Image (cartoon, helix red, strand yellow):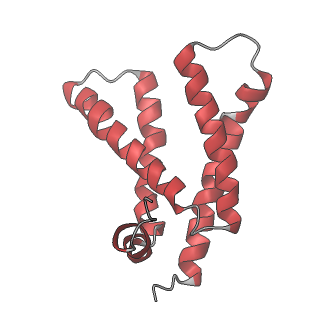
Amino acid sequence: MNEVSLFRLYFLRALYLLVSVGLGITVWPGVIFHEEPWELMEGVVQCMLAAFSALSLLGLRYPLQMLPLLLWELVWKSIWLIVVAIPLWSAGTMDESTWETASACLLVLIFPFGIPWRYVFAHYVKKPGARWR
């Protein structure tokens, strides 16, 4: 069986807590108290981040069941850093706003150390999927 150590479970919980508290401080005040209508994509981003922080609270209780949430975070931030930030940085055209976003995205570098990769492989790659019919 692919037992996940207690240390790894607490590391996962710490990651979920980091996401919940970090986004709770930065995103939720704007969601609750925003006065002017958001532009389309700003509204989408803020609501998605709020939902992500709320779902991360479930990770405190169910760290393994909520792993897809952390995997999603790792993947989208990695894609954004590779496709958006690195080309701008290498061209010397990164503005202050992009630097700020890149700095926040770089926190994802700690995620691979907390994710139990053997468990992920056993339960999301090797394990047969649900039936289609």
**Quarter of the image where one finds residue 66:** bottom right
Residue sitting farthest toward the left: 91
Horizontally, residue 118 falls left or right of residue 3, namely left
Residue shown at 70%/67% (left/top)? 61
In this orientation, which residue lies closer to the viewer: 77 or 3?
3
Q: How many marks?
A: 0
Horizontally, residue 25 falls left or right of residue 115, namely right
**Quarter of the image where one finds residue 36:** top right
Residue shown at 60%/37% (left/top)? 49
Depicted 81 relative to depicted 62: above or below: above
In this orientation, which residue lies closer to the viewer: 133 or 109?
133
Residue 21 in view (yes/no) = no
Residue shown at 44%/64% (left/top)? 131
Q: Position of residue 118 (x, y in %)?
A: 39, 77
Quadrant of the frame with the C terminus = bottom left
Residue 11 in view (yes/no) = yes
Horizontally, residue 130 falls left or right of residue 87, namely right
